[in-house]
Image (cartoon, rainbow, N blue to C red):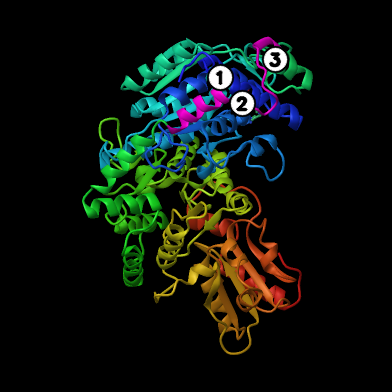
């Protein structure tokens, strides 16, 4: 491949000039990464990366994460040069235009060749960690003939300055994920200029103390980078290759400087670079010999792929079917029946001591059926209880499916995203709801990318015991409900919990947040039919009796039981009262108006909402004569019953609010 005309240096320059031409045309873009990492990328893609441009979704391909996602032209140029069909030159010519596949921060588009790339710095390397975990688990399950690939991440200074970057370094080193290789673009420039403005430590040393394999090379020396990648693959530890580079190398006016990051480029810059580097091809053109060398790189694993397919075809039929099921993300036969059986027996049993234990019980019931569930938890195994029979995934045993993440919520959520993006596994991330804020950047990326991660939370309100208001997430439900694409589910009891898990496991198009109480959830659904009543987001749990509905009480989770008590009091006074349970607002919003009206009651009817959280967002359900019983500020330290009374979240308060509204007073 390395003919004089298509020397490695010219292959790298092909990346450079596609990037320059696209950025000049668009009038914007981040040239620092594609120009500074052109040699690194050439070494990786032409000599090491296992992929086939003709089949971007080949399950045993190496994964590449562009964690410094602002430099997306690097990836677009690589995909075009290697011959990925969906990355034709017309896409490069429309870089950053609305509707182009090269829109920037390209997120996730496996069929184009984009695994995940992330705009928010630090997310990508944490995703890569999750991908490496998924690979290791699947490799242990199916063997190296079937699952045998690496995860590479392009990384900038920014990713390593973010806190989640450090969480990732610590956990990957601890788990000894030897197939994870970071390629650090060590150019010592960020947006503000020199990294010396804000960082003094020896970054590579942070990797060393976390037991990574660390090498330092000249990032513009293709041979040196290639040798380092080979050494990285051979080492039993995760590897970080610090590639010393010059940002925007090739642009005389900007290289090595602050403006190299993303200062505007002009046609004169492109002309100067062409003259300096002896590049005579017109804009958006790649010399034929260079292009054919790149295309050969894109096709060089075709035989490897065919051999892999033959090995998979030769697997015993049940093994092959199971592998295919996991790749397709299909749930196992019988999973729904298992959940339905669990649901059917739930009302006849005493309520579990805690809402989160109900969730744990449900998951335990399906654990053997769904081995692909990988459960990550941030050091709260006992109070969240989702480990049970699962073995730990460790440095020495990859067959375990419970990940002890340590107190590292952010990386836990971001790695769960990476696991989902890898495919073949179903990730859960478990902690307390107050710490959802530590996970939020990753939860938002899951929603944006449509990744089917299950974010599971305990301690969902003020009812958490006597350790203070910091762990009482009064505003978190509202903030998560505001996130487009996130299904937030808050079940009221064991039956609803089973229904919410049925919804969550069936939901493949994006993430779910499942929120459980720390306190006991009394049974509110005394009969558990086959129908999933939670499926429509809200439903009439108890209809008004003795006449036309006068009052509708709306509640979620632990407050549904209070609404039922309030209903009993109001009914006893001859006020026909319905109780509506609302486990998932987003699903209820998707219902037609007729259903919503039937559930909510007449628009001018009296409604009282109740949730041990702030009112924000409830207006949309309360109508013109609505009231709300909930929190007005942060909580306090105290027992659950004491605090519910202190903050006036009681059946009496709900009934009193309804009476006032019926009498025509202003609502609360
Ligand atoms: C979480 C987050 N904060 C801020 C930004 C905005 N941002 C984009 S690139 C960048 C500088 C990154 O520097 P580096 O990683 O060294 O990239 P390079 O300068 O080498 O292109 C910043 C601050 C971002 N994308 N994500």
Asked if 94 appears above or below 21 in the picture, the reply is: below
Question: For the point 32% across and 20% down, which residue is it?
Answer: 234
Look at the picture and state if 348 lies above or below 616. below
The residue pinned by badge 2 equals 286
Residue displayed at 54% across by 33% down: 79
Q: Nearer the viewer, residue 3 or 62?
A: 3
Q: Mark 1 points at which residue?
A: 12
Q: Does the residue labelled 2 lie within 8 Å of ligand 1?
A: no
Image coordinates for residue 167, horizontal then vertical, percent: 46, 28
The quadrant holding residue 148 is: top left
The residue lying at 56 percent from left, 53 percent from top is: 486
Q: Residues within 10 Å of mark 3 (few under 14, many from 20)?
A: many
- Spatial separation of the CA atoms under disc 2 and disc 1: 11 Å
* Residue 126 percent location from the top left of the image: 48, 33
Give left or right: position of 315 versus 617. Answer: left
Q: Is mark 1 on a helix, strand or loop?
A: helix
Q: Quadrant of ligand 1?
A: top right
Mark 3 = which residue?
Answer: 273
Q: Is the magenta stretch mostly helix, strand or loop?
A: helix
Report the residue at 66% width, 23% height from top: 31
């Amino acid at each position: 491949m390395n003919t004089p005309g298509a020397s490695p240096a010219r292959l790298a320059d092909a990346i450079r000039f596609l990037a320059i031409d696209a950025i000049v045309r668009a009038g914007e873009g981040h040239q620092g990464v594609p120009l500074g990492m052109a040699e690194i990328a050439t070494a990786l893609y032409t000599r090491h990366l296992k992929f086939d441009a003709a089949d971007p979704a080949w399950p045993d391909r190496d994964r590449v994460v562009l964690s410094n996602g602002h430099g997306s032209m690097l990836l677009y140029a690589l995909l075009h040069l290697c011959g990925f069909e969906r990355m034709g030159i017309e896409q490069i010519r429309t870089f950053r235009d609305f509707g182009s596949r090269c829109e920037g921060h390209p997120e996730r588009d496996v069929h184009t060749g984009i695994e995940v790339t992330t705009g928010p710095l630090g997310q990508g390397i944490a995703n890569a960690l999750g991908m490496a975990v998924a690979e290791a688990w699947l490799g242990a399950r199916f063997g190296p003939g079937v699952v045998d690939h690496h995860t590479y991440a392009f990384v900038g200074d920014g990713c390593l300055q973010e806190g989640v970057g450090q969480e990732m370094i610590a956990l990957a080193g601890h788990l000894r994920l030897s197939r994870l290789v970071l390629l650090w673009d060590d150019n010592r420039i960020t947006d503000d200029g020199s990294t010396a403005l804000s960082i003094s430590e020896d970054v590579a040393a942070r990797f060393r103390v976390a037991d990574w394999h660390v090498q330092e090379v000249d990032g513009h020396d293709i041979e040196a980078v290639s040798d380092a990648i080979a050494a990285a693959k051979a080492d039993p530890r995760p590897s970080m290759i610090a590639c010393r580079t010059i940002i925007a190398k090739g642009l005389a006016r900007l290289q090595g400087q602050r403006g190299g990051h993303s200062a505007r480029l002009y046609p004169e810059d492109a002309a100067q670079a062409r003259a300096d580097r002896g590049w005579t091809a017109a804009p958006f053109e790649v010399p034929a010999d260079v292009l054919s060398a790149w295309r050969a790189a894109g096709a060089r694993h075709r035989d490897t792929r065919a051999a892999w397919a033959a090995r998979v075809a030769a697997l015993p039929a049940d093994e092959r079917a199971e592998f295919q099921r996991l790749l397709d993300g299909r749930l196992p036969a019988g999973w729904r029946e298992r959940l339905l059986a669990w649901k059917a027996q739930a009302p006849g049993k005493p309520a579990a001591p805690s809402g989160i234990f109900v969730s744990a019980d449900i998951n335990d019931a399906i654990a053997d059926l769904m081995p692909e569930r990988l459960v990550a938890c941030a050091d709260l195994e006992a109070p969240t209880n989702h480990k049970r029979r699962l073995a730990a995934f460790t440095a020495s045993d990859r067959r375990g499916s419970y990940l002890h993440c340590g107190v590292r919520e952010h990386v836990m959520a971001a790695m769960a995203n990476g696991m989902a993006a890898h495919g073949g596994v179903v990730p859960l991330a478990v902690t307390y709801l107050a710490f959802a804020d530590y996970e939020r950047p990753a939860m938002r990326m899951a929603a944006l990318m449509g990744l089917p991660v299950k974010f599971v939370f305990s301690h969902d309100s003020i009812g958490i015991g006597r350790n203070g208001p910091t762990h009482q997430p009064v505003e978190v439900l509202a903030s998560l409900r505001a996130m487009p694409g996130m299904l937030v589910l808050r079940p009221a009891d064991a039956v609803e919990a089973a229904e919410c898990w049925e919804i969550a496991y069936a939901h493949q198009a994006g993430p779910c947040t499942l929120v459980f109480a720390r306190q006991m959830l009394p049974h509110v659904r005394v009969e558990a039919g086959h129908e999933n009543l939670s499926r429509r987001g809200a439903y009439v749990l108890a209809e008004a009796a003795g006449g036309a509905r006068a009052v509708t009480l709306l509640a979620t989770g632990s407050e549904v039981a209070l609404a039922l008590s309030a209903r009993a009091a109001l009914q006893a006074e001859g006020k026909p009262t319905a109780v509506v349970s609302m486990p998932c607002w987003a699903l209820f919003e998707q219902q037609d108006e007729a259903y919503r009206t039937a559930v909510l009651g007449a628009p001018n009817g009296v409604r009282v909402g109740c949730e041990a959280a702030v009112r924000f967002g409830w207006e949309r359900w309360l109508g013109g004569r609505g009231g709300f019983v909930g929190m007005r500020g942060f909580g306090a330290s105290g027992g659950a019953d004491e605090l519910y009374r202190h903050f006036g979240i009681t059946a009496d308060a709900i009934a009193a609010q309804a009476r006032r509204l019926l009498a025509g007073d202003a609502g609360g």
